[in-house]
Amino acid sequence: DTAVSQTPKYLVTQMGNDKSIKCEQNLGHDTMYWYKQDSKKFLKIMFSYNNKELIINETVPNRFSPKSPDKAHLNLHINSLELGDSAVYFCASSLSRTQGEQYFGPGTRLTVT
Amino acid sequence: GDSVTQMEGPVTLSEEAFLTINCTYTATGYPSLFWYVQYPGEGLQLLLKATKADDKGSNKGFEATYRKETTSFHLEKGSVQVSDSAVYFCALSDRGDYKLSFGAGTTVTVRA
């Protein structure tokens, strides 16, 4: 069983489009995260939810909107895609908000043309 | 704020060579420290961790010791294999601040 899953794995789209990435974890964890990894492999946290409540919202354009329908799911919606949004997006989860050990999904490679 | 600095790569080694990746950190509190590994085309996996000073984390032949006096958490492996080729990330999580702060990653390539 996959612990943290993301769909789709690859996403190619044009500038200006709106797209969503879905994430699900079956670990029973309370806290979920979205990270962006750029072409140089640098990882930066974008958002974190704890029991469906937003607890981290880093400096991210408001074109990015996370949604957590329940604590096992955290989706990322991106409006008006730009070239600079091209990256690999990782979802992760942890047992609780104070638990540093995180489990990562396989990533979604977004390419904006 | 919290930050992690790790040695720049890429690092290229021959099989059975000794690997060290340096990692130092800055934190306002008393952090937990982690090494994550990312194999090609995959997500990150926790490799090892340490939660207090002088703790040694170990897994798959890799080791790292939490050194508070030098604010370091260097990763070592005595004899690398081709399958160890990956990107290695040092990270910290400060107590009460539930974010993971990552280093820039070090790409390691092991040649047969």
Image (spheres, coloured by chain):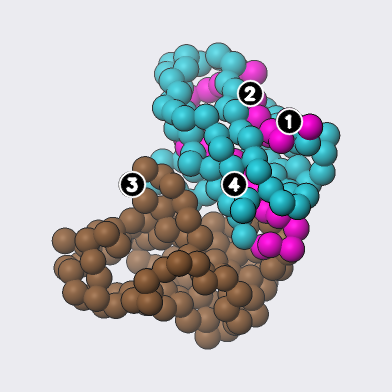
Give the spatial CA distance, label 3 vs label 1.
Answer: 31 Å
Answer above or below: position of A93 versus B5: below
Q: Which chain is cyan?
A: B
In the rendered image, which residue does mark 1 sit on?
Answer: B70
Give the spatial CA distance, label 2 vs label 4.
Answer: 24 Å
**Sooner in the amino-acid sequence: mark 1 or mark 4:** 4
Judging from the image, mark 2 belongs to the subunit labelled B
Question: Seen from this angle, which residue lies furthest bottom?
Answer: A69
- Residue A39 bears which disc, if any? 3
Mark 3 nearby-residue class (10 Å; few <14, some 14–19, many ≥20): few
Judging from the image, mark 3 belongs to the subunit labelled A
- Residue B3 bears which disc, if any? 4
Q: Position of residue A48 (x, y in %)?
A: 56, 70
Choose top left, top right, bottom left or bottom right for residue A2.
bottom right
Give the foreground label among 3 and 2: 3
Choose top left, top right, bottom left or bottom right for residue B70.
top right
The C terminus of chain B: image quadrant:
top left
- Residue B77 bears which disc, if any? 2
Kind of residue at badge 3: Ser
Mark 3 residue element: loop
* Residues shaded magenta: B69-98
